[in-house]
Image: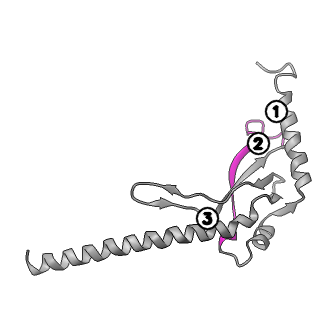
């Protein structure tokens, strides 16, 4: 091996070591962000379109062979859509809502500034309305 190849090998080893260290730190950062966002789980909100949702979990990483995908801005929620104008949309769905709470000093205040917080009972009532709508499907005589 000549001097250039030796130097290239040394740099390659350094890059590998740095990538491993980066991934260890990233894993720690993901856990820290999840812990920070865990205070939001169970909170209920409505957005500017009056769609109701309850936070049901913290963002979860998706692991791949070569990288870890983690989007701390997408918060998992149980959403309730009661707008009859949207007939082709599921009435109840597990989806995500965007929030910058993971990088805020106070994640609760941050998400309260992004969405309108509602009492648990209000969300439960909207969810029950959606369930009633689902239950009535096939009972109205228009089901095929």
Choose the circle earlier in sequence order: 3 or 1: 3
Question: Which residue in the protein does label 2 denote?
Answer: 92
Q: Secondary structure at mark 2?
A: strand
Question: Which residue in the protein does label 1 denote?
Answer: 134
Question: Which residue in the protein does label 3 denote?
Answer: 72
Q: Quadrant of residue 21?
A: bottom left
As displayed, is residue 61 above or below residue 28? above
Which span is picked out in magenta? 83-102
As displayed, is residue 67 above or below residue 17? above
Q: Quadrant of residue 59?
A: bottom right
- Mark 2 to mark 3 CA distance (whole Å): 23 Å
Circles 2 and 1, Cβ within 8 Å, touching? The answer is: yes
Identify which residue, 21 or 124, lies in the foreground: 21
Q: Is residue 88 left or right of residue 128?
A: left
Choose the circle earlier in sequence order: 2 or 3: 3
Q: Secondary structure at mark 1?
A: helix
Query: What residue appears at the point 26 percent right and 74 percent down from the top-left corner?
Result: 13
């Amino acid at each position: 091996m000549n001097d250039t190849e030796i130097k290239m090998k040394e740099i390659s080893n350094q890059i590998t070591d740095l990538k491993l260290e980066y991934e260890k730190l990233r894993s720690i950062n993901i856990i820290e962000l999840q812990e920070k966002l865990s205070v939001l789980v169970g909170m209920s909100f409505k957005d500017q379109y009056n769609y109701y949702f309850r936070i049901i979990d913290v963002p979860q990483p998706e692991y791949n062979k070569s990288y870890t995908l983690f989007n701390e801005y997408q918060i998992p929620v149980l959403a309730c859509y009661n707008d009859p104008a949207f007939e082709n949309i599921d009435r109840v769905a597990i989806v995500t809502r965007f929030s910058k709470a993971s990088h805020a000093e106070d994640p609760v205040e941050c998400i309260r500034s992004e969405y309108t917080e509602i009492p648990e009972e209000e969300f439960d009532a909207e969810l029950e309305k959606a369930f009633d709508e689902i239950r009535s499907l096939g009972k109205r005589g228009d089901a095929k």
